[in-house]
Amino acid sequence: MINLLSPKEKQGLLIERNKRIAIILWFLLLFFLVCLILILFSIKIYLNGQIDSNRAFLAKSEQEFLQSESEEFQKKIESANLKFQKLNSFYNQRVYFSQVLEKISAILPADLYLTEVSLAYSKEGDKINASLSGYAPFIEDVIKLEDNFKKEKQFQEVNFPLSNWIKETDIDFYVTFSIYP
């Protein structure tokens, strides 16, 4: 094709063409930047939503953890309290046999000595069943022991078998009784 245009017009058309290309390129660049900004903005919105939902999930998880930890701690406290109550109940129900032995030794006449002492706590009736056996040189000492048992109100159900009263000297005596603490 033959170009009949003058060089000046050719130059003007070339400049006009370059302007249009430049405008199109700038428009494409601007369009690309706008699309990039919109994509980045949508990513930012998405990430903020994810962060907010993760924060809410984390807060809920922390609350559940603290609540479960609190419940677990509460159960441990209740278990410890129950154990302490059982221990306290046990110690409140204990019987000091040493105190019982002191009372028995306080009523024994000087010439008597014991060969056997048996103490057993009975929950039925909340009492201590006791039996003593020993040696007395004279019957008067056994009589004095019986009188001492009768004077003390804590010693009840005192029983001296008949075999204690047969001999007048060198007596192997036996006595059973109950103590109500």
Image (spheres, rainbow, N blue to C red):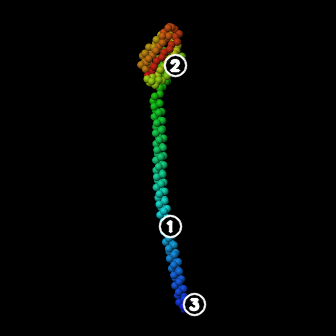
Residue depicted at x 48% and y 17%: 176
Residue 62, given in percent of the width and then of the height, sits at: 48, 51
Nearest to viewer (mark 2 / mark 3): 3
Instruction: Give whichever of discs 2 and 3 has the lower sequence position.
Output: 3
Q: Is residue 128 above or below residue 45?
A: above
Res 156 → quadrant: top left
Per the rendering, the mark at residue 2 is: 3
Instruction: Give whichever of discs 1 and 2 has the lower sequence position.
Output: 1
Residue 130, given in percent of the width and then of the height, sits at: 48, 19
Mark 2, secondary structure of its residue: strand
Residue assigned mark 1: 40
Residues at marks 1 and 2 touching, judged by CB atoms closer than 8 Å: no
Q: Is residue 133 above or below residue 19?
A: above
* Crowd rating for badge 2 (residues with CA inside 10 Å; few <14, some 14–19, many 20+): few
Identify the amino acid type marked 3.
Answer: Ile
Mark 1, secondary structure of its residue: helix
Residue assigned mark 2: 117
Residue 154, given in percent of the width and then of the height, sits at: 43, 20
Res 92 → quadrant: top left
Identify the amino acid type marked 2.
Answer: Val
Name the foreground residue: 176 vs 145: 176
Name the foreground residue: 49 vs 116: 49
Query: Between marks 2 and 3, how big is the CA–CA gap?
Result: 145 Å
